[in-house]
Amino acid sequence: MTFVNVKGARSRIRLRRVLRWFCVWIVAAVAVVIAIPSLRTACLKKVGWMLVATGKPVTSADVIVLALDSEFPAALKASDLVKQGVSNRVAVFTSSQPWEGEYVRRGVPMQGVDVVIGEYLVQLGVPNVERIPVSAIGSEDVGDLLPRWCEQNKFRSVVLVATPDHSYRLERILRRSFKGYHLTGSVLPTPYSGFDPDNWWRTRGGIRTEIIEFEKLMLDVLRHPFS
């Protein structure tokens, strides 16, 4: 017999309806502003920068971690931080995709993103590359796993490098997840990314990224308004 959490399902439906109407009002407000040429560019830039973490300068940290789905552009920023003396250690989450095992079964060697990025980091001059031995699927998983991994390894400070469009939501998640740990963390956006908050509306890819990440951010704000 299957039991359904009716109350929880209704709550999620109501939350999504609120989010949908909120986004509709935001889009309508933006449309009005766009109709006024003098305000158009300034408004669109502000909407783009809403996704970006503050990126406060960091002078030192025990470890630099690459955010999920940001590994390739984040690796370049991480190597810059290593050269600046912020840390000599960079960590990557291990990848675990369902199709990887099928490649191995068919006799085709398969390297996860963490292995490939690890090799790139070495070539970029990073002396210590570590793999976080837990598979994370999304940002919430990172928030759950990262503080525990840091505590196990006695790290007290961490810098998480992410793409700009993903960085502010990660910053909110880390603020929540680090509570109760003797750990300080910062989220830095990498400049080596295809998303430009000053010009996102000029390309289809930028518009798509803005819409998707803005919706995720608003959902996070509605679920955790005091993060």
Image (spheres, rainbow, N blue to C red):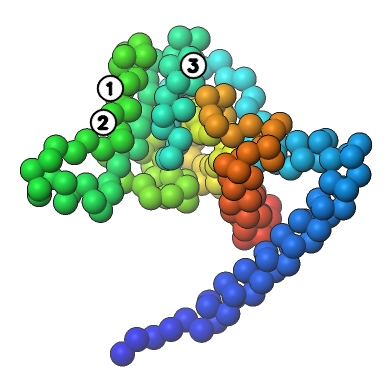
> Tag 3: Cα neighbours inside 10 Å, few (<14), some, or many (≥20)?
many
Reading the chain from its start, which is encountered first: label 1 or label 3?
A: 3
Mark sitting earlier along the chain (3/2) = 3
Mark 1: few/some/many CA within 10 Å (<14, 14-19, 20+): few
Which residue is painted at 82% across and 53% down in the image? 31
Secondary structure state at the residue bearing disc 1: helix
From the image, tell me which residue sits under label 3: 81
Is 209 positioned to the left or the right of 76 in the image?
right
Of tags 1 and 3, the one toward the viewer is: 1
Q: Nearer the viewer, residue 16 or 33?
A: 33
Tell me the SS state at disc 2.
Answer: helix
- Alpha carbon distance from label 2 to label 1: 6 Å
The reply to whether callout 2 and callout 1 are in contact (CB within 8 Å) is yes
Find disc 1 in the rendering and name its residue.
Answer: 119
Residue under the image location 34 percent in, 86 percent down = 2
**Whole-number angstrom distance, CA of label 1 to CA of label 3:** 17 Å
Q: Where, by quadrant of the figure, is residue 62 drawn?
A: top left
Quadrant of the image containing the N terminus: bottom left
Q: Viewed as shown, does residue 88 lie left or right of 51?
A: left
Q: Is mark 3 on a helix, strand or loop?
A: helix
Provide the residue designation for mark 2. Answer: 115
Is residue 175 visible in the rendered structure shown here?
Answer: no
Marker disc for residue 14: none
